[in-house]
Image (cartoon, coloured by chain):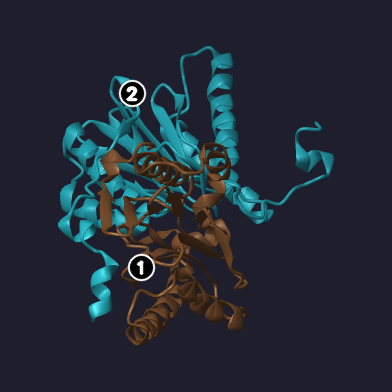
């Protein structure tokens, strides 16, 4: 896409060119995301919420085409809801991840979607599943995704520690997402954090003026 | 000779820009001309260089800024400054006027466009000469337009409405500065390749003044932004 095209506004489809992140700590997990949805060079939504509800203790972080990921998340939310009703208890995070995986794998030629599924269940505790473009499923202790993630691999690789406390994990996610937003043009705005534990969900809104790196 | 690729025969054709600078906004005010840019150069979608001065002083009463390929901006600054310097050889105190630079740049841009090797820039030349304010846009093709207000890049989409509602050609310097700051606030919110640290420069009777970089304030703590949690959506 060259400069003249940008000027003549051949807008690209809306994507969450983005920074998303999830980290397991001792007792739960922290999820973080920026708030920019872009259509090419235009910021279509400067305060988006990329942390989607799937179930009471299961969330997904979306990157890639906003339309594709929203549609898939809506299906999975419906299927998980029906499944949880039948089960009579909290569904497994792995189940949600598998449902996402089925979409991403079967329709891999038509979709542009990469998703991080993160949550807590009573069977295995906090879990994170990364689902990249092709539909593979990889369980990890921490995961970063979106275009902004390329800028923070070094930061995350050197700063991640096993069994962090809540404060350490929160600071890790906050600074990592802030560093990614600092350098990625497709990420920006405010930071949304979510703390998922056995007992509760806590959302946090980090105003632009409180973002540690600007 | 080897540094001039046209003469040495190994001519490059600029295909697409690599390091790019963002929008330029320039306004005429009562007593001079003011130009504003942000201080970011992007490397594709990466915000690679964050403290870049993108407004250059060409002569005592002319300034130049552009959006587009940054290496082309630096080349143009060299060419225009060369003209100003070589005027010293005549030792008569006469320097080219701002309009001379604008015209030169337009002819240069058009020549390069005809050779399908353009300067990937939208240029703004601003100055103050003989009591007259000067402001001109030269685009990638060599189109030359003199005007009282100029916007390049994304600012052309978002900022013209702000300018036409809050500015007039006889406003004060402070009013013009405020309008430019408001424009860059909107750009920071809506342009992926914009940065909230800007730089202003103005030319008046006394000469050129390039100010220190400043950060514009944008508001993000609206209730609607905070409580947009998607957990409410699933009940729809």
Residue at screen point 32% across, 60% down = A198
Q: Mark 1 lies on which chain?
A: A
Q: Are marks 1 and 2 in contact (CB under 8 Å)?
A: no
- Identity of the residue furthest to the right in this view: B9
Report how many numbered discs are placed on residues in the image.
Answer: 2
**In the displayed structure, does residue B155 sit left or right of residue A154?**
left
**In the displayed structure, does residue B225 sit left or right of residue B113?**
left
Per the image, label 2 sits on a secondary structure element best described as strand
Residue B127, above or below B227: above
Residue at screen point 60% across, 83% down = A106
Per the image, label 1 sits on a secondary structure element best described as strand
Chain B is which colour?
A: cyan
Residue B235: name its quadrant.
Answer: bottom left
Are callouts 1 and 2 both on one chain? no
Q: Where's residue A210, x and y in %?
A: 28, 39
Q: Mark 2 lies on which chain?
A: B
- Spatial separation of the CA atoms under disc 1 and disc 2: 50 Å
Q: Mark 2 points at which residue?
A: B209
**Quadrant of the rendering where the N terminus of chain A is positioned:** bottom right
Residue at screen point 41% across, 47% down = A26
Res. A40 in view: yes
Res. B148 in view: no
Q: Where's residue A135, x and y in %?
A: 60, 73
Front-most of B178 and B5?
B178
Chain A is which colour?
A: brown
Q: How crowded is mark 1: few (under 14 residues within 10 Å), some or many (20 or more)?
A: many
Q: Name the residue under label 1.
A: A52
């Amino acid at each position: 896409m060259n400069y003249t095209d940008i000027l003549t506004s051949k807008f690209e489809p809306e994507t969450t060119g983005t920074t998303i992140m999830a980290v397991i700590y001792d007792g739960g997990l922290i999820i973080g995301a920026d708030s920019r949805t872009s259509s090419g060079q235009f910021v279509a939504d400067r305060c988006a919420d990329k942390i989607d509800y799937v179930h009471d203790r299961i969330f997904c972080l979306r990157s890639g085409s906003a339309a594709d990921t929203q549609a898939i998340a809506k299906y999975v939310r419906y299927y998980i809801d029906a499944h949880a009703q039948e089960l009579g208890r909290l569904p497994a995070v792995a189940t949600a991840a598998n449902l996402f995986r089925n979409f991403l794998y079967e329709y891999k030629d038509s979709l542009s979607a990469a998703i991080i599924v993160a949550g807590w269940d009573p069977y295995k505790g906090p879990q994170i599943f990364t689902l990249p473009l092709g539909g593979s499923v990889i369980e990890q202790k921490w995961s970063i995704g979106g275009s902004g993630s390329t800028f923070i691999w070094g930061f995350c690789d050197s700063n991640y520690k096993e069994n962090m406390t809540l404060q350490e994990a929160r600071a890790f996610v906050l600074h990592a997402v802030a560093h990614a937003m600092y350098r990625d043009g497709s990420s920006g705005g405010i930071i949304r954090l979510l703390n998922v534990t056995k007992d509760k969900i806590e959302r946090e809104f980090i105003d632009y003026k409180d973002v540690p790196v600007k | 000779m080897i540094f001039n690729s046209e003469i040495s025969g190994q001519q490059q054709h600029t295909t697409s820009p690599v390091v790019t600078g963002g929008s330029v906004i320039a306004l005429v005010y009562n007593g001079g001309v003011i130009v504003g840019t942000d201080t970011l150069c992007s490397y594709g979608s990466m915000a690679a260089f964050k403290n870049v001065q993108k407004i250059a002083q060409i002569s005592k009463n002319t300034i130049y800024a552009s959006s587009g390929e940054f290496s082309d901006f630096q080349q143009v600054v060299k060419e225009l400054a060369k003209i100003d310097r070589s005027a010293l050889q005549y030792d008569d105190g006469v320097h080219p006027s701002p309009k001379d630079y604008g015209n030169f740049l337009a002819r240069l841009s058009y020549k390069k466009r005809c050779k399908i090797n353009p300067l990937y820039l939208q240029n703004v030349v601003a100055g103050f000469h003989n009591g007259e304010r000067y402001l001109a846009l030269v685009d990638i093709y060599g189109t030359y337009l003199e005007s009282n207000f100029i916007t390049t890049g994304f600012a052309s989409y978002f900022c013209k409405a702000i300018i036409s509602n809050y500015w007039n050609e006889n406003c004060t310097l402070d009013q013009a500065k405020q309008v430019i700051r408001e424009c860059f606030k909107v750009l920071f919110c809506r342009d992926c390749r914009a940065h909230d640290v800007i730089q202003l420069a103005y030319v008046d009777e006394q000469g050129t003044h390039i100010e220190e970089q400043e950060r514009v304030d944008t508001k993000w703590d609206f209730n609607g932004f905070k409580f947009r949690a998607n957990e409410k959506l699933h009940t729809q």
